[in-house]
Image: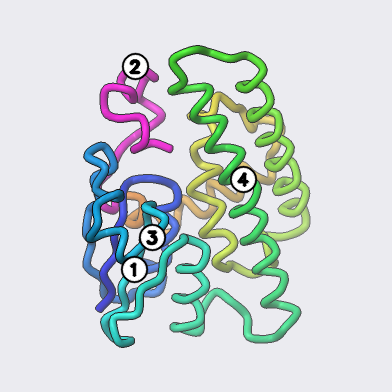
Amino acid sequence: MIDLYTSPTPNGYKVSILLEELKLPYNVIFVDLEKKEQKKTGYLKLNPNGRIPTIVDHDNDDFTVFESGAILIYLAEKSGQFLPSDNKGRSVVLQWLMFQMGGVGPMQGQAHVFYRYAPKKIKYAIERYQRETMRLYTVLDTQLEDHDYLAGNFSIADIAAWPWVRSFRWAGLDIEELPHLQHWLDVLAERPAFQRGIEVPYKIDRSKMTAKQAQEKGSKILI
């Protein structure tokens, strides 16, 4: 059994989606970011960075893994799925996984902050992070023009990127001019494991929530 410590964020959804795809048994432990539970001593013993998600694999001597990308790799290797074993195939998947971890996530996360939550709207910051996020989206769109999935075959790279890209409107962006990216979003949205994964630990709908409502619910929950 795997314990999943998580909250309803793109990084949290990565792991719940993969667990659903793998059909591995897991127990959900909700970490309330508004109450700063991720900063409490007990949780910091599992994840010294004080972020979500974190997993504890009780089938492997209670082995603990933090950082969403590292968790995806661990689970893919544990199951032998969604990460090729050959050097070239594995490298391609990891390249696109790192692209999400080092680019899309950080840049779009800042776009969310400055566009939605900052008490003072700083035009330069908003435009900078929106522009960089769109540049990264364009890279994805170009890759998807000739590939069904980011690394060719469905992989943890797709699982990592999808929860972020699906929230493009929350960053104040429009992907109408990126048809391959939109098609990829739609195809993955039809997968039952993705549909189940984004309801862990509970379902929220950013598209119908105003910035004020988001602030009332706690800004960190939606980043």
Left/right placement of residue 215 relative to residue 79 reads left
Left/right placement of residue 63 relative to residue 37 reads right
- Label 2's element? helix
Q: Is residue 67 above or below residue 103?
A: below
- Residue depth check, mark 2 versus mark 1: number of the one nearer the observer: 1
Q: Around disc 3, counting alpha carbons within 10 Å, would you say few (fewer than 14), some (14 to 19), or many (20 or more)?
A: few
Q: Around disc 4, counting alpha carbons within 10 Å, would you say few (fewer than 14), some (14 to 19), or many (20 or more)?
A: many
| Contact (Cβ within 8 Å) of mark 4 with mark 1 | no
Mark linked to residue 192? none
Mark linked to residue 104? 4
Amino acid type at circle 4 is Val
- Tell me which label, 2 or 1, sits earlier in the chain: 1
Left/right placement of residue 140 relative to residue 188 reads right
Residue shown at 55% from the left, 43% from the top:
165
- Quote the CA–CA distance across marks 1 and 3: 13 Å
Q: Around disc 2, counting alpha carbons within 10 Å, would you say few (fewer than 14), some (14 to 19), or many (20 or more)?
A: few
- Quote the CA–CA distance across marks 4 and 1: 23 Å
Q: Which residues are magenta?
A: 200-223
Amino acid type at circle 1 is Ile
Mark linked to residue 48? 3
